[in-house]
């Protein structure tokens, strides 16, 4: 396997570690919110972690797109198009990064991040935040499988 690909895989692995760190924080914050469901501070903190989680996933997808030169031209739909792009295999270029299962939860997280960024004065619903956090933990399992599959296919296609 060429050096460039090894560096790329190492960078992806480093980003995976960042995602797992955020997941760990989300698990702790979710438990804290379950124990104090009326805490606006914990609700907001968990929402912020969910925002960061999607951003960390998106940073990984940007790495993939850059490596394979999969540029996205429509700036207005960039986040949606980037996520969709990761769910498809581009024949002769790269395997898909995401399964349908992972794509669905990530799309929901993407939508939440958009609302979170633009809902300055809104009060967040703790129950809804907990449900999204629970989905993000299921996503962690499916994504880790997707990620290993992607790396395996990448290694195989380049050997």
Image (cartoon, grey):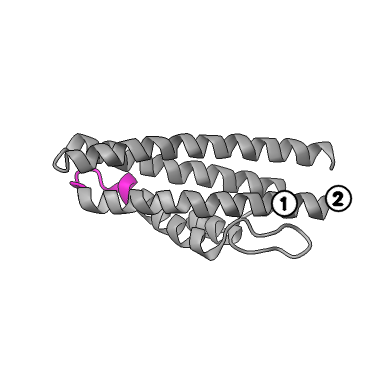
Q: Residue at x 71, y 39 (%)?
A: 8
Q: Residue at x 46, y 55 (%)?
A: 106
Q: Quadrant of the N terminus?
A: top right
Give residue 12's mark: none
Please tell me in which quadrant of the rendered image residue 105 appears.
bottom left
Kindly report the secondary structure that dominates the magenta region of the rendered protein.
Answer: loop
Give residue 159's mark: 2
Residue 159: % across, % down: 86, 50
Q: Is residue 77 left or right of residue 4?
A: left
- Label 1 – label 2 distance at C-alpha: 11 Å
Marked residue nearer the N-terminal end (1 or 2): 1
Q: What secondary structure is marked by label 1? A: helix
- Give the residues drawn in magenta, as a range: 115-124
Q: What secondary structure is marked by label 2? A: loop
Membership of 122 in magenta stretch: yes
Residue 80: % across, % down: 49, 58
Q: Is residue 143 left or right of residue 107?
A: right
Residue that carries the numbered disc 1 in the rendered image: 152
Q: Is residue 126 above or below residue 11?
A: below
Labels in figure, total:
2
Q: Residue at x 63, y 64 (%)?
A: 88
Q: Is residue 15 above or below residue 158?
A: above
In this view of the protein, which residue sits in the foreground, 115 or 47?
Answer: 47
Q: Residue at x 76, y 58 (%)?
A: 93
């Amino acid at each position: 396997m060429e050096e460039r690909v090894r560096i790329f895989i190492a960078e992806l692995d480093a980003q995976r570690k960042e995602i797992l760190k955020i997941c760990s924080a989300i698990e702790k914050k979710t438990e804290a919110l379950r124990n104090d469901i009326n805490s606006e501070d914990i609700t907001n903190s968990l929402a912020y972690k969910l925002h960061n989680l999607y951003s960390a996933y998106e940073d990984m997808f940007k790495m993939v797109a850059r490596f394979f030169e999969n540029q996205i031209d429509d700036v207005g739909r960039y986040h949606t198009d980037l996520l969709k792009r990761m769910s498809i295999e581009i024949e002769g270029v790269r395997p898909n990064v995401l399964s349908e299962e992972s794509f669905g939860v990530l799309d929901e997280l993407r939508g939440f991040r958009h609302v979170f960024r633009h809902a300055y004065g809104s009060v967040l619903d703790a129950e809804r935040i907990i449900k999204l956090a629970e989905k993000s933990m299921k996503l962690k399992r499916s994504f880790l499988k997707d990620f290993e599959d992607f790396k395996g296919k990448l290694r195989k296609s380049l050997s």
